[in-house]
Every structure is written in structure tokens, then in C-alpha cells.
Amino acid sequence: MVARETQFYLSRRQNLNETVSNLQQSLKLVQQELRMTEPLAACYSTVAN
């Protein structure tokens, strides 16, 4: 039973690590997109006024 619980814990831990990694990658991509978009928004704001 201990071995099964340990295996279950390790599996959940691996899934958690993968989820965190995917979230970090998503955050990185969104931050990159924001860095590219901010200058365009600032330029549009200047032209619109």
C-alpha cells in the first residue's frame, strides 16, 4: 500500500511540475506579446489624440 501511495504521489507531483512548467511558458509568451504590443498601443494613443 505504501508503494502504491508513493507512486500516486510521484505521479501527481510530476503532473503538477508539468502544469507549472506550461504555465511559466504561457506567461513568458504573454509577456513577450505584451512587450511587442505596448509600443503599438502607445503610438496609436499618440496619433488618436
Image: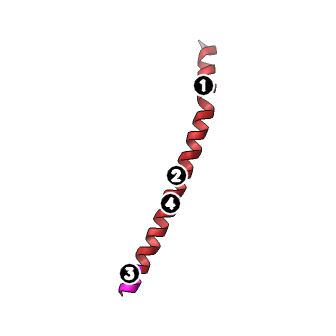
Q: Residue beneath label 3, please?
A: 5
Query: Could you give the CA–CA distance between mark 4 and mark 2, rounded to whole angstroms?
Result: 9 Å
Q: State yes or no: residue 35 in magenta.
A: no
Query: Could you give the CA–CA distance between mark 4 and mark 1, rounded to whole angstroms?
Result: 32 Å
Magenta: main secondary structure equals helix
Q: Quadrant of the C terminus?
A: top right
Indicate which disc, 4 or 1, sits on the residue closer to the N terminus: 4
Q: How is the image coloured?
A: secondary structure
| Foreground: disc 4 or disc 2 | 2
Q: Which residue type does callout 2 highlight? A: Gln
Query: Could you give the CA–CA distance between mark 1 and mark 3, rounded to whole angstroms?
Result: 52 Å
Q: Residue furthest bottom?
A: 1
Indicate which disc, 4 or 2, sits on the residue closer to the N terminus: 4
Asked which quadrant contains residue 43, the reply is top right
Q: Residue beneath label 4, please?
A: 19
Q: For the magenta stretch, what is the residue range?
A: 2-6
Q: Is residue 39 left or right of residue 10?
A: right
Q: Residue beneath label 2, please?
A: 24
Q: Which residue type does callout 1 highlight? A: Ala
Question: Dot 2: few (<14), some (14–19), or many (≥20) neighbours within 10 Å?
Answer: few
Q: Position of residue 8 (x, y in %)?
A: 42, 77
Circle number at residue 41: 1
Q: Secondary structure at mark 3?
A: helix
Q: Secondary structure at mark 4?
A: helix
Q: Secondary structure at mark 1?
A: helix
